[in-house]
Amino acid sequence: MIVRMIPRLPGLLRMMPRLSAGTWRFWGIMVFIGVNILWVGVLEKFAPIWVGIIIGAVIMIAIMKYGPQPMEEEE
């Protein structure tokens, strides 16, 4: 199923809202914090906290890299 979704990824990126880089940075940090709180509360029994930090950091970097898009001017 994941393999079928890969070609559609550019279409999904176009559907993302056009927000400023600062807003995407904010949401990246919030997701990082949320993943770590979820990890400490639920998943720490199964894996150490550094795994949650790595997963949160990867998601945060992906949001910051693929989130901001240049604004398109309409004619």
Image (tube, helix red, strand yellow):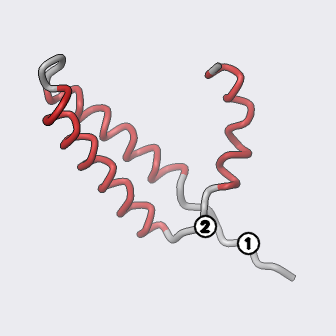
Q: Position of residue 44 (x, y in %)?
A: 14, 26
Q: Residue furthest right?
A: 75
Marks 2 and 1, Cα distance to the nearest angstrom? Answer: 9 Å
Tag 1: residue type?
A: Glu
Task: Indicate which disc, 2 or 1, sits on the residue closer to the N terminus.
Answer: 2
Question: Which quadrant holds the N terminus?
Answer: top right
> In the image shown, does 4 or 69 lie closer to the viewer?
4
Q: Which residue is mark 1?
A: 72
Tag 2: residue type?
A: Arg
> In the image shown, does 12 or 42 lie closer to the viewer?
42
Q: Which residue is mark 2?
A: 18
Q: Nearer the viewer, mark 2 or mark 1?
A: 2
Element assignment for label 1: loop
In contact (CB < 8 Å): disc 2 and disc 1? yes
Question: Which quadrant holds the C terminus?
Answer: bottom right
Using a 10 Å C-alpha cutoff, classify the residue at mark 1 as few (fewer than 14 neighbours), some (14 to 19) or many (20 or more). few
Q: Position of residue 58 (x, y in %)?
A: 37, 37
| Residue name at image x 31 percent, y 40 percent | 57
Element assignment for label 2: loop
| Residue name at image x 76 percent, y 78 percent | 73
| Residue name at image x 18 percent, y 43 percent | 37
Using a 10 Å C-alpha cutoff, classify the residue at mark 2 as few (fewer than 14 neighbours), some (14 to 19) or many (20 or more). some
Residue 55 in the image: above or below residue 65: above
Left or right placement of residue 12 versus residue 25 in this view:
right
